[in-house]
Amino acid sequence: MSLMIEAGQKAFDLGVPIAVHLDVTYRCNERCVHCYLDHDDHGEMTTAEIKSVLDQLADAGVFFLTLSGGEVFMRRDFFEILEHARRLLFVVKIKTNGVMIGAAEAERLRALNVDTIQISLYSHRPEVHDAITKLPHSFERTVKAIRFLRDHGLRVTIANVLMTANLADQSGAQKLAADLGVHYTLDPTITPMMDGDLSVLALRIPGEELEDVFRNPALVPNQEEFCAPPKPPSDADLEGYSCSAGHSFCYISPYGDVFPCVQFPLPTGNVRRQNFLDIWNGSPQMREVRSIQARDLTTCSSCSHVSTCTRCPGLAYMEGNMRGPSTADCEKSFYRTGVPTANMLQQGLSRPRTTAPLVQIRLAAASA
Amino acid sequence: MPDIYIARSSAIAARILAGEMMIMNSADSTFFTLNEVATAIWQAADGRTPLSQIVREHICGQYDVEAGQAQADAEQFVADLSHHGILLVSDRPFAPQASA
């Protein structure tokens, strides 16, 4: 076990929030077709409020800090926030579309010793990328930013969200990342919009296509192990829990709302009214999330995939029960291994349902 | 051996977890954890206190260890972290801004 995995496990066991994802704004200069956010500013935290939150996170033991949005550079004070975060010795990862990053910004990011910059890029073809972001010339500006960052010695990862609009361009985007000399990640998850609008779910790639993704050796090098049929769960598997949401990780919105994860819209408190550690340690919702073991899961505890499934409790929550199945992950488990899940068998399905009835919860209203 | 001064590099990230210091060097993403004694030295590395004084006050005063051995161990530890670029070493005190 590597030292970092060991530290992560220790934090999980002790209930230390070792990693936090903080969205500093929901405003954005792109209007991506799949984005679930409401980009209007409903009163995001001030510079002073964010600095105070960062102070509290450092005191609480947070080590890995992801700063994201919206587009982080839409905040004029972003570098001030970042400087404060680095003064507090966080490992900082930034998620951005890169459109506002030039040589000067890349140099400042390098000087601040940012650990990783993750940049959204949806295709190797400008017309496809720009059609998804709805910002003309965004492809050109994003690729330029990647070059600036790379040339300044920063670690860059291209993050591609796989959807119907760019499914055919996956390998092209991966090759572009290789040509640029940066890392590449792929995520097929599309979530409902914050106002409850489910229309974006139509962009999800059909389940059958997942099979091709999982069987692609360029994306999954350890095919045999990754696609192997699940082994029967051990007692330790059933007593444990594989997701860090609420255990050693949480999410904070630009309005100060605290949630177990960016994809788990269960309100647990607000740092404008409460101390972060009081929410982390005392919130009944956090405690409930933390109390769940694999053996408590309805349906999933009896599923043959229980020890290897990527079941997302946040997606399960959006389906109506945080202890229930996450249909999107049932789909992944099935197409990865060819073995039906307990959820599918219970519903008499030989193939997974393609659309999960997810419901997003409007977060800003909770803090209004 | 003349006294040396140690300062934490500003390029690193660090946090205590269960009494042990985690350190990440952003230059190459190398990750370290320091035990309790090494953590005490790290925390005292203000760039202005001589290493011998750190050992005397933070190690010998807190742990049951012979002074010469503690000093030798501390020098080895400092050399290791200096090699990885996460501790800065000098034969004179650092200017205040050099310390993280």
Image: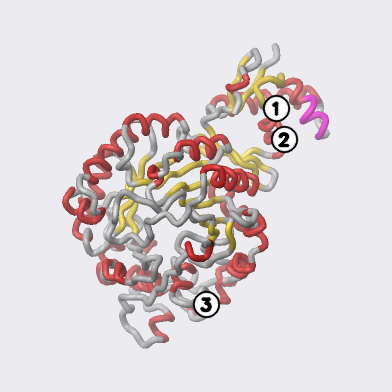
Depth-wise, is mark 1 or mark 3 nearer the camera?
Answer: 3
- B61 falls in the magenta region: yes
Where disc 2 sits, the SS reads helix
Category of crowding for the residue at label 3, using alpha-carbon neighbours closer than 10 angstroms: few (below 14), some (14–19), many (at least 20):
many
Could you tell me which residue is drawn at 26 percent across and 62 percent down? A163
The residue singled out by tag 2 in the image is: B37
Q: Pinpoint the chain carrying mark 1.
A: B
Q: Quadrant of residue A195?
A: bottom left
Tell me where residue A131 sits by quadrant: bottom left
The x and y percentages for residue A24 are 46, 49
Q: On the rendered structure, is A282 left or right of A167?
A: right
Which residue matches tag 3? A301
Q: Which residue lies at the image location 77% right of the left edge and 30% below the top edge?
A: B58
Q: CA distance from mark 3 to mark 2?
A: 44 Å
Read off the chain for label 3. A
Q: Amino acid at mark 2?
A: Val
> Pointers 2 and 1 in contact (CB under 8 A)?
yes
Residue A180 as seen in the image, left or right of residue B14: left
Residue in view at x 65 percent, y 54 percent: A275
User: What's drawn in magenta, residue-wise?
Assistant: B56-62
Tag 1 and tag 3, C-beta contact below 8 Å: no
Point 41% across, 45% down: residue: A72
Residue type at the position of mark 1: Asp
Q: Residues within 10 Å of mark 2 (few under 14, many from 20)?
A: some
**Do the residues indicated by labels 2 and 1 lie within the same chain of the protein?**
yes
